[in-house]
Amino acid sequence: MEYEHNSEIDKKIDEIQVLKEKLTIEYEAQKKKAEEIALETQKTEKTKKIKDEKVYFEKNYGKVISWNDAYSMIEKMDKKVAIFENMLGLSICDEKTNIVLLDSELQDILQNGKQENVESGVQINLFSLSNNVDEKKDNKKNIENIYRLLSEKEIIAYNVKEYMKNGESEYFGYSVGGKTYGINNDRFGIKCTEYFDILLARYVLGTESLQEIEEIILDEFGVEIATFEEKFKKERRKKDFSDVSDDVICEFLSKRTFFIYKLETIFRNRLQNEQFLNIFDKLESRLIPVLAQMEETGIKIDKKYFSEFQNELEQKLSTLENEIHELANEKFNIDSPQQLGEVLFEKLQLPSGKKTKTGYSTNVEVLEMIANNGELTEDKRMIGKKLLEYRAYKKLLSTYIEPIPKLADKDDRIHTTFNQNGTSTGRLSSANPNLQNIPVRTDDGIRIRTGFVAKEGHSLISFDYSQIELRVLAELSKDRHLVQAYQDNQDLHNLTARKIFFKTEEDEISRHERSIAKVINFSILYGKTPFGLSKELGITVQEASQYITTYFEEYPRVRKFLDIVTETAKLHGFVETFYGTRRYISGINATNKNVQAQAVRMAVNTVVQGTAANIIKKVMIELYEEFKNDENIKMLLQVHDELIFEVRDEFAKEYMEKIEKIMEKTVKFKKVPLKANGSVAKNWGLLK
């Protein structure tokens, strides 16, 4: 039966829809208010509990015991224990007991006044009181037994990953005979399988910044405790800890384990209440041993290559320096912004000389304006070009080529640190060195990567997902044309190019047109404005605006998806990835349009990029489980969603097939297939 169109009915339907939306907003507001009242009540109760705990701790902080007595005491402790370890010693705490084991070499210093090279962050050998071989064997056995016993416990710690690593590096964990022993110690067959990471829990709960344990304790308990740098400032400066008493060390270590133990219950309850426990236990926590093994394995570099590259850059810089001085007709310090500004804008009278309180601005934008100013003479434009070239080489040298070889161990391997809580979207970040910052697909980036090599008899394998973020967008938005493109294995950039340039199926798409379409596909994803797009493509704002309009006409569900994400962020103050990782979006309801626009971009980026990050983590866990006991292959790096492996040459093809299969089957979307691409080469620069 067909119904006639009735404007009155349509009007009523619209009114009901508006009322429904209004009631939803009012309900959410009331719910939020109730949650705030409940939170305030919790804070009041928490404050009282904290006061009681502060008094308890002041009366009952840990006690120092000998390593010989440690085993029997740890054996009697609860299944769940908190630990904190640094160069001073090891503290272990459960509900009723808090013990501290002092570093034996430090004890020797304290007792005999001897001074060795003891610095914060540098591991020192335990049990070095005697040169007696039998005693050393007994001491090593003590460590083995104690750490094996700890491995049977559920470990609560701040930054658990650092306790899982072995090897000759500046890790947490005690060292014997040049080897560092952590809780997850393969040499002793010690495997810590149950653990709770305070730092990671804090991050999953929505705290973005990398926080020290002292900051977390202050924020959660209102208790201020001194950092190592603050507490031992004088000793660190003198490199002399001989005046530090056992009681001071004991209090320093046991305070941390006391609060770390308390934090586990608080954070676990909060994770449970906010429905984050699944992503914490099944994803983020399971990734910890994966990253620990990757950091411990590291990647080999070719020191000779870096040395030759450094010499080449230094020669180029020297030549450029002479050329710049010749163009300026004056010798000056090019690296001094003050001297450079005076030469460019006072002596040479170049335009764009904006003087601030600290002098003239000589940033890249200013130098580019000089280099591209058609009204200037060739010599004056040339000085801008030479300065840009000088800056690029200088940055390359100081940021990568000089420092990277200095970070290599005795086997010429670099051990970067992967941070799970270093980004707001859930992607991994890296430090010491920061491999994420190496330029991608530029000549400089390729040359830097060429210095990262496979060890003898091995090759490097690289794998990533094809257009993973655009595939995530297609799956989440359910846009018919996007989904169809990936189901039919079409070139999405070609498809978009046909639409924005109004081409038929028979028309050829040029490389330039495809390149523009590629920029537009990603620009929409990252919320680029017509102005921003026009600047990137070198076109008018009107042309850029038309491209964006045409894009949304072709992919209408993308527009709807972006609107839903924005409204969700405005209503709740946060967004979540497909798998439940949450990010709070500050400024989403700001009256300042620029602030709000930035917040909208953050919201969309978090949902799409964060979902892609979740997928990569899931795959890394699966690959680790598959290969963790396989000596023929090791996962080394994860950089920009690219996974790098080191594999024995004769098995390269076999493992290429295995990795591809695991990556494409681990996560299955309902509509959009995920496609993995891989390559094999002797160095990172040759990997595609």
Image (cartoon, rainbow, N blue to C red):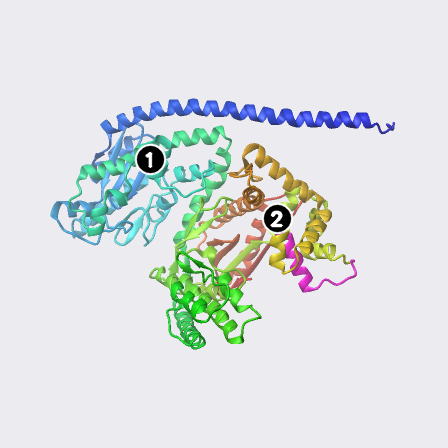
Q: Position of residue 45 (x, y in %)?
A: 38, 22
Whether residue 593 is in magenta: the answer is no
Residue 117 visible in this rendered orientation of the protein: yes
Q: Quadrant of the N terminus?
A: top right
Q: Nearer the viewer, mark 2 or mark 1?
A: 2
Distance between mark 2 and mark 1 Cα atoms: 43 Å
- Screen quadrant of the C terminus: bottom right
User: Where residue 601 sits in the image (x, y, percent)?
Assistant: 57, 45
Q: Is residue 368 above or below residue 137?
A: below
**Image point 25% across, 45% down: which residue?**
141
Residue 522: x and y in percent read: 62, 52
Q: What amino acid is found at the position of numbered circle 1 in the picture?
A: Ala
Q: Does residue 239 show up?
A: no
Q: Which residue is mark 1?
A: 82
Is 518 within the magenta? yes
The residue at the point 45 percent across, 38 percent down is 207
Q: Which residues are magenta?
A: 504-528
Q: Which residue is mark 2?
A: 525
Q: Position of residue 661 (x, y in %)?
A: 58, 51
Q: Nearer the viewer, residue 664 or 317?
A: 317
* Mark 2 vs 1, N-terminal side: 1
